[in-house]
Image: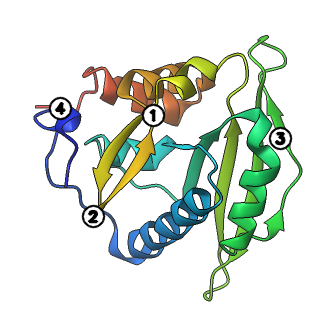
Amino acid sequence: MVPAAARGTRTEHIAYAPHVALDLIAELEIVIGAMESAAVPYAVCGGLALGILGYPRATMDIDLLIAPADVASASAAVTQAGFDIPARQMIFGLSTGRRREVLRLSKLDPDGSLLTVDLLLAGEELIGVFQTRMTVPWRGRMIAVVTREGLATMKRIAGRPRDLADLATLEGTDEDEA
């Protein structure tokens, strides 16, 4: 089911690559369940949020925006969901003055691949995005996701080529749109 906010935007039917998405979507459901069981506020962001908002594209990880105060409880919930291989906390944007922190937790897929959850801390640059998250119906449940505007803000701040392409899609300026 596509949220009302996404209807009529780009597509109403979301299709994912079957060999990746079924596992990734199932893992997202497990992670969201763990976050909700632990009462940890979150917002789906990144490539999966694009799909939920009606702009599907391939993605290989789960990105969740969380409050910095919830990093320990979010990490525990995601670990309980099986993502128990930690990476060092990553800090981006120091040279631009737009500091962003990410805690990465992964799990080993049966085929030997790593599936990753990135917990993005809603610090000074992203707190507004976190505070304006919305709840939408998705696969028979309600989930929290960043708004379209919030996702555009995140993509603009990150500024990598993939983010800029996503931003063009969100703003309707991509060349593939008919």
Instruction: Choose mark 1 or mark 2, whichever is in front.
Output: 2
Instruction: Choose mark 2 or mark 4, whichever is in front.
Output: 2
- Spatial CA span between label 2 and label 3: 34 Å
Residue found at x 61% / y 26% = 158
Is 145 on the left or on the right of 155, as rendered?
Answer: left
- Spatial CA span between label 2 and label 4: 30 Å
- Total labels: the figure holds 4
Q: Are marks 1 and 2 in contact (CB under 8 Å)?
A: no
Would you place residue 137 above or below residue 98 in this image?
below
Q: Which mark is residue 140?
A: 2
- Spatial CA span between label 1 and label 3: 21 Å
Q: Which mark is residue 146?
A: 1
Q: Are marks 1 and 3 in contact (CB under 8 Å)?
A: no
Instruction: Choose mark 2 or mark 3, whichever is in front.
Output: 2
Q: Residue furthest bottom?
A: 110
Marks 1 and 4, the one that precedes in the sequence = 1
Residue 55 falls in image quadrant: top left
Is 57 on the left or on the right of 86, as rendered?
Answer: left
Q: Are marks 2 and 3 in contact (CB under 8 Å)?
A: no
Q: How far across and how far down the image is residue 70, in percent?
A: 75, 42
Query: Could you say whether the residue bearing mark 4 is in a helix, strand or loop?
Result: loop
Marks 2 and 4, the one that precedes in the sequence = 2
Is 42 on the left or on the right of 138, as rendered?
Answer: right
- Spatial CA span between label 1 and label 4: 23 Å
- Mark 4 — residue? 177
- The kind of residue on which mark 1 rests is Val
- The kind of residue on which mark 4 rests is Glu
